[in-house]
Amino acid sequence: MPALQALSGWLRFGDQQLGWYHGPPSLCIGTGVFCILIRDTGGFLAMRMSQLFFRTYREAPSEAESDAYKLVVRAGLARQIASGIFTFMPLGWRVMRRIEEIIRQEMEAIGGQEVHMPVLQPAELWQESGRYDAIASELFRLKDRNKRDFVLAMTHEEAVTEMARGIVNSYRQLPFMVFQIQTKERDEPRPRGGLMRLREFTMKDAYSFHDTNEDLDRYYPLVVQAYLNIFKRCGLNVVAADADPGMMGGNDSHEFIQVSEVGEDQVVTCPGCGYAANLEAAVGKLMVLPQEEPKPMEAVATPDIKSITDLAEFFKMGPERFLKTMVFSGQNGLVAAAIRGDLEVNLAKLARVSGQGDLQLADEDTLIKAGLVQGFVSPVGLKNITIIADTSVTESFNFVAGGNKVDTHIKNVVAGRDFRVHHTGDIAEVAEGQSCAACGQPLRIDRGIELGHTFKLGLKYSATMGATFQDKDGASRPIVMGCYGIGLDRLLQSVVDGNHDASGIIWPAEVAPYEVALVSLNPDDQVSAAAEKLYNDLKEDGFDALYDDRAESAGVKLKDADLIGLPVRIVVSPKTLKEGQVEIKPRNGEFYRVALAEAIQSVSGLLKN
RNA sequence: CGGGGCGUGGCUCAGCUUGGUAGAGCGCUUGGUUCGGGACCAAGAGGCCGGAGGUUCAAAUCCUCUCGCCCCGACCA
């Protein structure tokens, strides 16, 4: 093929004709296609659908389960390339950029400064924090050409702490908050739910640095409020729920949960006072038992009576008078959890109180090996097993407990007197309908999606990685840190989850990929001319319009408009144009007609509220 | 990692039980007719039936192994 000496053709950017090009082929990236580089101004350009790189689907791929994910795929926002790994296409990416912009504004409003830290990081950093060994398989590891160990960051605590210790010397430099919007890599055991749980995803992570815990306490609520603002602007009603701070300890922690049937978490909320908590951290009001004097223990024959229900009937007493003992096996051996008969053990709480992760209900073989009898297990007389007592058990006396012998129970068991308690704490799981500890209203439990998480890190990273500063007295102290995350991909899918109908997405105005869908139906010359003029006028007035100028049937165009779900639709067609009118329809409202000349004004009014 | 399901054209799926030249709808191309809710007619293009090995005269179909994807659970700082 002979080398090209020169080329000519129209130069275009998007749908804008920039001029005729004649010159060397260096800018040619394909037959008749020229590439010129223009610095993005941050503005969003209007677009013709005939030029938009996109595709909608009548049917969603079979792997899509949830409505929201189906719509993400059908509307052509993103597509999966491998399990938990996605490509965002132009429509979807515009939504991402809109979400990013909201987040930037709210983070900057509370003093945040945007930074950008690498995803590829040396293993040493993670060895310093201890997470290189602590995290077994979720961390992607690799080597460079010199066989040095690297990781792909799953979060950026190490990197940000490294940055802080390199910059901060004095309390005078504190406090400050930095944030970034960056890719995270996690080798998830099971990616799922489309954009819900990914192996590669985008997170806004923020870190604040303080000289004292008090200063972190002062700042923390600002972040919580900023988060609520962000979700609200994204069209979601997210609750800030008390969260399990996890095995790493720490005190204050909130999860920002969007109630959804497809959620992975369970959130307890009170309709009365607004209390909200992750089930793993939630507390409810317990039935109060009458005060009694401790009585002496007494064995009772209970032939084949094992369950609390049967025992309650046998003894003619409520389930709250029994002491239920559940045995779990963990990394460091068995754990016996003693709890009142009317309550259930929450595993996360038990893990926290016992200090043992990886707990599983022990199977029958394990019980037998430990010399225990299923149905009659009791903390009384247990040896070599860690005993955890729920506070419900230590606050009252005279429970009926198992006898650790077949067909035997013991009356009047008192914690501490009749069995040793290694740890006491709240390990009870809140039940649907249980009374709220604060106001007494019945609690409800819903599934929900965790969109954001804030917590007070404290000294965990600054202490282990040596990020210290000199205080007023000249003493060297580790920096007090807070850390705050939002998952953007799942936020996008949640916006769809919370804003759609049977026909498609209903984008909240602030995150919509375009503001206005301009659709020409069955265009004749007059209709085309009117639509073209409207499109140009919209652009000139600064509206992000998506103009469906495709040679498609009316049905296809209208279905696509509903599916893509822009906030306002303008239809230009012969039917209304012969009366000098166009049809305007909010995506979530009724259509009406206005004079062609008033269309933009009308649309503008709709978008303002 | 345990349990279950599925891999056949871009998408949804049939064919597999009982081996015998690979199908439908949607989408795509071309021409014509239509023209306000995924139009119609005609003619086309497009498939190492996820991969490897085996059985057989013959494998999408039977057997073995493997890879991928989905769901439930475990896990999820």
Image (tube, rainbow, N blue to C red):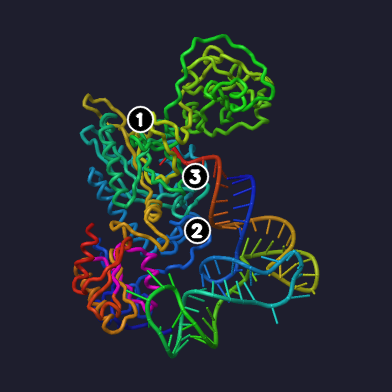
Spatial separation of the CA atoms under disc 2 and disc 1: 41 Å
In the rendered structure, the answer to whether residue A515 lies left or right of residue B64 reads left
Number of marks present in the image shown: 3
Q: Depth check: A412 or A105 in front?
A: A412
Residue A463 in the image: x percent, y percent?
A: 36, 31
Please name the residue shown 61% across and 12% down the image.
A298
Local SS, label 1: loop
* Left or right, residue A136 beside residue A482: right
Segment tinted magenta in the rendering: A543-571
Q: Is residue A546 magenta?
A: yes
A6 falls in the magenta region = no
Q: Amino acid at mark 3?
A: Glu
Residue denoted by label 3: A138
Disc number for residue A149: none
Q: Is residue A26 visible?
A: no
**Are tags 1 and 3 found on a single chain?**
yes
Kindly report the distance in space between the C-alpha atoms of the residues bearing marks 1 and 3: 41 Å
Binning the other alpha carbons within 10 Å of mark 2 as few (below 14), some (14 to 19) or many (20 upward) gives: some
Whether labels 2 and 3 share one chain = yes
Count neighbours of disc 1 (C-alpha within 10 A) and say few if under 14, some if 14 to 19, many if 20 or more: some
Q: Which residue is mark 2?
A: A64
Q: Label for residue A439?
A: 1
Residue A408 image-quadrant placement: top right
Q: Mark 2 belongs to which subunit?
A: A
